[in-house]
Amino acid sequence: MKDFKLRNKFCTAVLAGLTAMSALTGCDTREPPAADTQLVLDTTASVNWSDWGDRQDSYLTNDSNRVPYQTWLSKLDDAKDMSLLDKANRVNDLVNNTVRYMSDNANYGGEYWASGVETICAGVGDCDDFAIAKLYALKYLNVPENRMCVLGVTTDTIVSRKMNHAVLAVDTSAANNWVNCLILDNRARSLETLGQDGYLPYYMINSKEIRQCKLKVLKPPAP
């Protein structure tokens, strides 16, 4: 019972922090990172949960959802043999051009993490919905789910330090160790590298688990 209450308390705190998320438009020009960065998990703070993954499977049992969603996914068929970077670019463009931003309060009446099929079929969503839709689109292109996560971040690392945005993080490192991972953002027209984007990560989230994380700046290579 204690573990259950702790899990609910942690999940509630995370999701409550995400209710303030808002979308921004345009693409900022930022300086490249001064050094390599690594997304590091806090292995002591892992909370199991089940949310959009179950609904993704459930919604796809209905033809009225599955058929339009699969038709939309088929737009990516020519990208299946592309590099991971090219796949990420294609998916980022396609989702950003398909989905229109709408807050969860306006769309659902409160905080809600929509599955990929829900967001694509509705054509609207907030920042975490964009990120989840991109995760499933990349999964369709055979990108392993363990190389992706929804990343809860703050866009203001100096003043508020409060989580207020979500993006999709993709690990493109050969060692699969989350070094210089790519960021797919609904507010940006191009991909960025974590550390370049100016965001401070708080949580790595997938369909089953929430884990606290931090950004580690690695020593730059010797000249």
Image: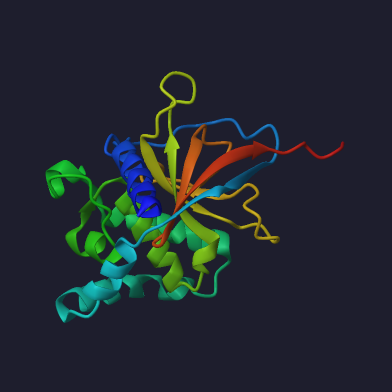
Q: Position of residue 70 (x, y in %)?
A: 29, 76
Q: Is residue 154 depicted above or below 72 in this figure?
A: above
How many labels, in total?
0
Q: Position of residue 39 (x, y in %)?
A: 60, 46
The answer to whether residue 96 shows anywhere in this view is no
Residue farthest top in this picture: 159
* Image-based side of 23 in relation to 45, left or right: left
The residue lying toward the viewer, choosing from 71 and 51, is 51
Q: Position of residue 35 (x, y in %)?
A: 70, 35
Q: Position of residue 221 (x, y in %)?
A: 81, 40
* Image-based side of 31 in relation to 77, left or right: right
Q: Residue at x 68, y 32 (%)?
A: 34
* Image-based side of 120 in relation to 222, left or right: left
Position of the C terminus by quadrant: top right
The answer to whether residue 93 shows anywhere in this view is yes
* Image-based side of 112 in relation to 33, left or right: left
Q: Residue at x 56, y 59 (%)?
A: 85
Q: Residue at x 59, y 30 (%)?
A: 31
Position of the N terminus by quadrant: bottom left
Residue farthest front in this picture: 1
The quadrant where residue 140 appears: bottom left
Q: Residue at x 40, y 53 (%)?
A: 3
Residue farthest right in this picture: 223
* Coloration mode: rainbow
